[in-house]
Amino acid sequence: MTNLTRLLAHEMADLLRRGEVTSRTLTEAHLAPAERQNHALHAWLTIDRERALDEADAADARLAAARAEGVDAAKRLHPLLGIPVALKDLVSIAGGQATAGSRILDGYRSPYDAHITERLRDVGAVVLGKTNMDEFAMGSSTEHSAYGPTSNPWALDRVPGGSSGGSSAAVAAFHVPLGIGTDTGGSIRQPAALCGVVGMKPTYGRVSRYGIVAFASSLDQIGPFARDARDAAALLHVVAGRDDRDSTSAPVPVPDELLALPASNDEAAAWLRGRRLGLPKEYFVAGMEPGVEERVREGVAALEGAGARVEEVSLPHTEYGLATYYIVAPAEASANLARYDGIRYGPRLGDGTVLENYLATRGRGFGAEVKRRIMLGTYALSAGYYDAYYLKAQKVRTLIKQDFDSLWAQGFDALVAPTSPTVAFPFGARMADPVSMYLSDACTLPVNMAGLPGISIPCGLAEGLPVGLQFIGAAWSELELLRLSRAYEAITADAEWRTLEPTDLPRADDPSTPTPTERARAASAGVSQALTSPQAGVLRS
Ligand code: GLN
């Protein structure tokens, strides 16, 4: 008997349509490891077994009705019908929790479904639960979750990346074939890279954010996690498209070809012939690990070997990406987070005046990183500083966008780059130094600043940990990026690393394995020891 969790979503869809498996069986097969391994991985903040099985039964009824109607009706079913999906815990489900990884939304229940929840429900996908994340999606490791960190399935003492680390870990650990994340500066692509899965950030405006907890409104985008390009394309197809309730969602048609990426490797690889790809030299940043650079350069060589033309290009304003992002994103966050006042959402602390209660609620409800961002943001927006910081950053943002535009004007089909300069790092490694955490996204942030689509796909391992290859395209070129990703999968289909599973899953199965919170505590005890050790003292003096 095949292990159902190891199938891709499109393989599960074939079995479902042929009546060889039910969605209930498929859903139970995924719930079991998700529940069993959650103490060791903590990918999930909540798993809703009952609701998932109800949705699976509903999917089975739809499948049976279509099969009774005939082959054509079964073919018309959406490939996501009956397939398990994970949602990051900032997506609203009517009556369900949406903590955004924060204490300030503890106990809050969404009064309505997000647009993407409705879309998933319409096609009959099965939502298994809500996944862990950095508080308000601020972070690159999921260590900033108020509910404790998530472990990387490849190495339990390391982070899965962030901020959508729960979804990426759940997909990597075979708890679900598909997951939803959000990407403001890299939060889908970076955890995808660190967990060895596919993660796509669509063009700004591609997916409606109605019902999603906002971080930085001019940057946030929702996107898919999957284990291959075809599955990512199918999930994007479901959630994408104009929605009147989000005025930034664009009236751009969603191509149905997203559901028809080639199954054959030859056909998929043929797409590469004659394509022109740019390799931005600035993305090989200082501090990039040699193993990561090697894998990325091998990936580039494989693309060239299959007929793509790869040319080194320059995006000269890349070096300002980080600085401008950390003005724009906190500024917008400080405005978006003003609504958490202890009156409208979640818990209300204090029993004094309105101001006292406000201060108590926000003081205890927000974590350190969120407070840091609010302070940075309100400072950058304050009278006298607005022009010097926020306005200046917006101007530099235009220059970053123009760098990309000039490459599209020269006829490049896409850019190929690393996703993350490093593999998954140990718990605690970047917690004491915010800037080192911010640097995790040096290769992903500029894409958000320019509003472009980007995707990270696995390209092998370095020191036994996954490395991601990033493709970046012009606005609305998701289909081309997914074809390129599918082509890369085709030309590396026989690579040995493709046969490897996350190495720490057996330990995640063991009930005596420590939790991520215990691991992170042990790591931070180690860090503070190192700082007070005689050697550290010598370095400081
Ligand atoms: N790591 C970046 C930040 O902390 C990006 C996060 C995101 O994309 N949501 O802001």
Image (cartoon, grey):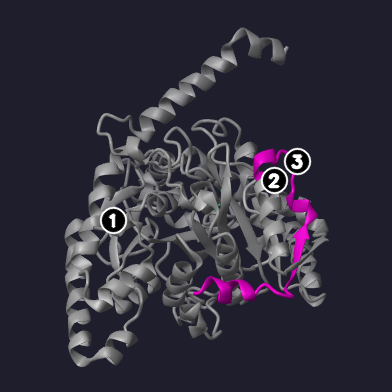
- Is residue 495 shown above or below 433? below
- Residue 289: tell me if it is visible: no
Q: Residues within 10 Å of mark 1 (few under 14, many from 20)?
A: few
Which residue: 19% across, 63% down? 25
- Work out whether 514 lies above or below 181: above
Q: Secondary structure at mark 2?
A: helix
Q: Is residue 145 left or right of residue 444?
A: left
Query: Dividing the image into 4 quarters, which one contains the N terminus?
Result: bottom left
Q: Position of residue 139 (x, y in %)?
A: 53, 46
N-term-proximal mark, 3 vs 1? 1
Q: Quadrant of residue 310?
A: bottom right
Where does label 3 land, which residue? 286
**Magenta residues, start to end:** 264-292
Q: Secondary structure at mark 1?
A: loop
**Mark 1: amino acid:** Asn
Q: Residue furthest top?
A: 534
Res. 67 visible in picture: yes
Disc sitting over residue 293 in the figure: 2
Q: Nearer the viewer, residue 149 or 105?
A: 149
Answer left or right for 221 relative to 180. right
Q: In the rendering, at what x and y percent does residue 349 appear?
A: 32, 42
Q: Amino acid at mark 3?
A: Ala
Q: CA distance from mark 3 to mark 2?
A: 11 Å
Nearer to us in this view, 382 or 147: 147
Q: Amino acid at mark 2?
A: Glu
> Is 288 in the magenta?
yes
